[in-house]
Amino acid sequence: MSNIEVKSYRYLRTAMVALLLGLGAAVVYHSLQAGAFLASVSAYYYTPAQAIFVGALIALGTCMIALKGTNEVEDVFLNLGGMFAAVVAIVPTSRGADYRTAVRACEQADSPALEKLDCPTVRTLAEATNANVENSTVALLFVGALALLAAVLFYSLKDRRTPGAKFPRWAFVATLVVYGGCAGAFAASRAWFIDNAHYIGAVGLLACIIVVAVANALRRDQGRQETLNAIPGALARSRDFYAWFARILLGAAGTGILLWLVDWISLFLLEIVVAAFFAVFWMVQTIERWRDEPRPDGGDPGELSPIKAQRSSPGSGRPDHDQTDRTVGQA
């Protein structure tokens, strides 16, 4: 892997955190201007923060899909998380029960509530939302189909010629299932899709974030582990930032969901806590792996290169203390 590729990898990871911070800044600024926070982050779709909300989530999803995970599980759930993030961005959350009641009333010619409603405005809002979702979903499905086709073509033209390369069947199937579910729901019932896709996407994105954190906690690179085993006490010292962070994230998400279900906290607070944990986790991992050198054998950034492994091996007599310190924190 060349130095340019490694730098691109670093900047892509950093961009994901920058996008979350930008979204947070837009949400906080509008809330300070309005004097109150809304019920959820998704509700900011209907505020002046809409452009940043949609743009940040689309860009975040693109980064998650483009980024190569450190193992197969992380790679798959980054891809799925990116797909869910795009759905959350383009399908807005409901405006609330009052708005839904108004829409239904305006659709009924003999409704007694018509005298109190501005039905032209209500209908305009509903039609604009439907048109936005329809246009954006068609574009998203079109790009998704091209991406699935490109994955097959890339493997056929290049990867299959690489010794030991295997087509990621279960990853492709998982992606195809999510894509097919989205396309099928959109084709079957636009109204159902508009009412429910946002919530399904939000739950899916949350689940993918948690799985990515857990996958990092369970990740064990063989080269690193051999190096750690050669250093007395290193394994104990390395237990284990990612494992503890994954436990904290799981605990916070589980507790937050329960508290939200019983109306003790708002959905907004739950979303902010999970996003903040993920941003911290992602940035710490990025900083720890920032100085990893390009591997001449084409390995992913963050893996211990053969030269480093040899220098740090028990028989070399030349432990690489700089690499050891970084490796202990990354195991």
Image (tube, rainbow, N blue to C red):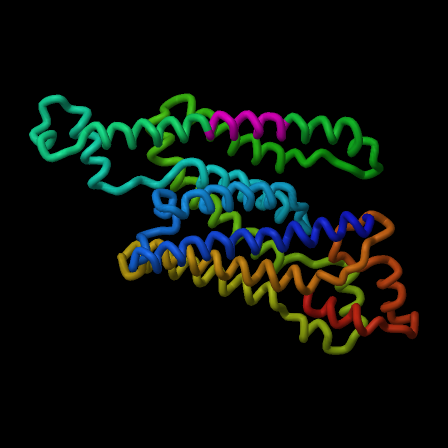
* Residue furthest to the bottom: 232
* Residue furthest to the left: 112
- Residue 94 picture location, percent across and down: 31, 40
- Residue 154 picture location, percent across and down: 73, 30
Residue 47 position (above or below residue 245): above
Q: Looking at the image, which residue is at 77% across and 60% down?
A: 292
Q: Looking at the image, which residue is at 37% across and 54% down?
A: 30
Range covered by the magenta-colored residues: 136-148
**Nearest the camera: 313 or 15?**
15
Residue 229 seen in render: no
Q: Looking at the image, which residue is at 65% across and 59% down?
A: 286
Q: How many marks?
A: 0
Residue 5 position (above or below residue 151): below
- Residue 236 picture location, percent across and down: 67, 74
Residue 246 seen in render: yes
Quadrant in which the C terminus appears:
bottom right
- The main secondary structure of the magenta stretch is helix
**Nearest the camera: 210 or 281?**
281
Was residue 126 drawn as part of the magenta stretch in this picture? no
Residue 235 falls in which quadrant of the image?
bottom right
Q: Looking at the image, which residue is at 39% across and 51% down?
A: 41
- Residue 125 picture location, percent across and down: 29, 32
* Residue furthest to the front: 33
Residue 211 position (above or below residue 111): below
